[in-house]
Amino acid sequence: MRNLFRNVNFWIAVIILILPIVFPEDVFRTLSLTAIYAIAALGMSLLLGYTGQISLGHAAFLGIGAYTTAILTTQYNCPVILAFIASIVMTALIALIIGKPILKTKGFFLALTTLGFGEIFFVFTSRTDPVIGGLVGIGGIPYFTIAGYEFVSYTQIYYLNWIILYGLVLYSQSLVNSRSGRALRAISTDETAASTMGIDVTNTKLKIFILSSVYAGIAGSLLATYLSMVQPYGFRVNFSIFIVLSVIVGGMGQLWGVVAATVLLTWLKDEYLNQYQEYSVLIYGIILILILIFIPQGFGLLGQTFLDRFQNIRLLPKLNKEK
Amino acid sequence: MSINYILQFVFIGLSMGAIYAIIALGYTTIFRASNIVNFAQGEFVMLGGLFTHFFMVSCGFSYLFSGILAVIFVILVGIGLQLLIIRPVRKAGVLISIMATLGASMVISNVPVPLSSIPKLGYLSDPFTLPKLTATFEAIEIAGARISSQRLWVICISLVLLGILYYFSNYTRTGKAMEASASSPLAAQLAGIRIEKMVLYAFAISAAIGAIGGILITPIFNMRYDSGMMLGLKGFVACVLGGWGKTSGAVLGGFMLGIIESLCVGLIPLFGSLYQQMWAFIILIAILYFRPMGILGGEVEE
């Protein structure tokens, strides 16, 4: 029992459960969305934070999930839960196909190639076509439904999304603390050394790429039911940047940190900056650059950065620099 | 399908390829001096066109003068980018520098949006075009295929520009010093090369050639404030196609990409033109799969 009270996961579960009692329903409009973004960011954290592989086309995987759900539910009257599963299968399949050639590259090249993949997705979805709907997108996607129970209010959607997110965090925690999790960190540190230790680098990278795409697919499917519409502009490079930024701000290899960063950044992007309308992307870009210049290691190490600068005191061991 | 028809698309491809080669050279110039890939490269091209358009419409300057002013302003943007953003994050690693240049690209391409709410500047967020360099003759005919005067100008000026840059980077002291500062920073410093200055030069040069490319391409290209990203990505594909980090590779890759893309659009019925923007990336994924080092590349770069 004492261990339970010391457990971070337990307290976060408590907070997630009691929040709707404390706050009015309005808050959960943004918080439901936050959970969706956080699921995508969590997948990115596994890929980028633990394995050190950059992807700037992650928004496209959300898009694949969202579009699969949208097309199946609106045009084939498929039950939402089946469309949800189909979205996951679809993203995994596409990640498998494109992951093989793309993951041969590293660093800058991987970043630009995945960015290119994101643009292909945008071009593909923005063409005029009765199934895909062109720039207008697809509307009228039904609410998420499990066995006849419909998630209609923001509080209901909040619980659904955060429970899925919570489950995925728990799964990710067990993954990164297992043998394969250590393999990921080994790859992130030194690929050659990792392969000498008997780790199948190519295969492991492909697996984690598929897993993180599946996270994005889950997020995309939830996003489609949450917004009840999908549009190609929603899944462009700006969104991919947002996901990567969440991981940077949250700290590499900090699963709950990434979730916290997503809460902060979603509020910043979707609530606070919206009042500036046409300036919002501009201000957002400037904030992005300032974060990168002043706190490139995320908020987790912000305190240490300050201490370094003023007193030369070292509390935490210095993180390995990204290669 | 006659030979004229194919030749027609080869000519169109050559002129687009010239621009891709210019953008690719921009990447190469910065990469050779600093080991950084500048994701905001395409924005220089867009800004070259946009600044010229702005000076002509709002200030009423002549085409030539506006063009020169535009190149100067884009060079200033390039220098600002290096001093304000790249320099502070350079030591922080690949991921941070990627995100920083992407952020810069986001900021640059979104400045025209709020500006367009000012009454007289409303045109800044619309698609824009520039007059052709020569209005006197429309097109010439080579072997039954027509090539417009502007496309001819694009090809000629780009070739001259590429020649100058090739000479500069391979045969002058500054050019060699720039390369030295990337391949071995410490040794370069010991030899008396000021690395930060070389990186600054590299940004200024690649901003300048990007701006000239932008002015040349705007009359025949559907330019808008957000076109930079796509152009930049295609320039990158050209770099990889030709062989990363090599001046000759960038030029060859640029022209090849232009021609392949144009032929895909022209010769593949229905799908070809529908997915015009996609071919470059399909080519990219194919190269990475079969020959990651590119056509002229020796070994796989990291």
Image: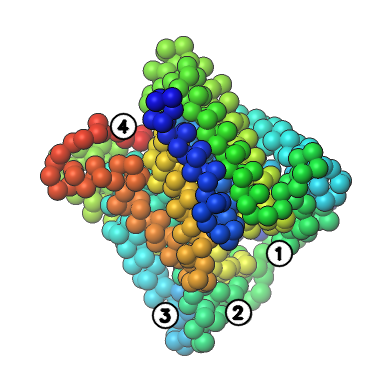
Label 1 to label 3, Cα distance in Å?
A: 30 Å
Q: Are marks 1 and 4 on the same chain?
A: no
A195 versus B100 height, above or below: above
Could you tell me residue B278's position as x and y percent?
Answer: 67, 49
Label 2 to label 1, Cα distance in Å?
A: 16 Å
Q: Nearer the viewer, mark 1 or mark 3?
A: 3
Q: Nearer the viewer, mark 3 or mark 2?
A: 3
Could you tell me residue B201's position as x and y percent?
Answer: 29, 56
Q: Secondary structure at mark 2?
A: loop
Discs 2, 1 touching: Cβ within 8 Å? no
Could you tell me residue B54's position as x and y percent?
Answer: 48, 79
Label 3 to label 2, Cα distance in Å?
A: 18 Å
Instruction: Give the total of numbered labels.
Output: 4
What's the amino acid at mark 1?
A: Arg
Instruction: Identify residue for label 4.
Output: A320
Instruction: Identify residue for label 3.
Output: B65
Label 3 to label 4, Cα distance in Å?
A: 51 Å
Q: Going 39% across and 25% down the picture, which residue do you hit?
A: A2
If the image is split into quadrants, where does the C terminus of chain B sit?
top left
Q: Around disc 3, counting alpha carbons within 10 Å, would you say few (fewer than 14), some (14 to 19), or many (20 or more)?
A: few
Instruction: Identify residue for label 2.
Output: B135
The disc, 2 or 1, on the residue closer to the chain's N-terminal end is 2
Q: Nearer the viewer, mark 4 or mark 2?
A: 4
Instruction: Identify residue for label 1.
Output: B146
What's the amino acid at mark 3?
A: Phe
Q: Around disc 2, counting alpha carbons within 10 Å, would you say few (fewer than 14), some (14 to 19), or many (20 or more)?
A: few
What's the amino acid at mark 2?
A: Ala
Query: Relative to A108, is B8 on the left or the right?
Result: right
Whether residue B173 is visible, yes or no, is no
The disc, 3 or 2, on the residue closer to the chain's N-terminal end is 3
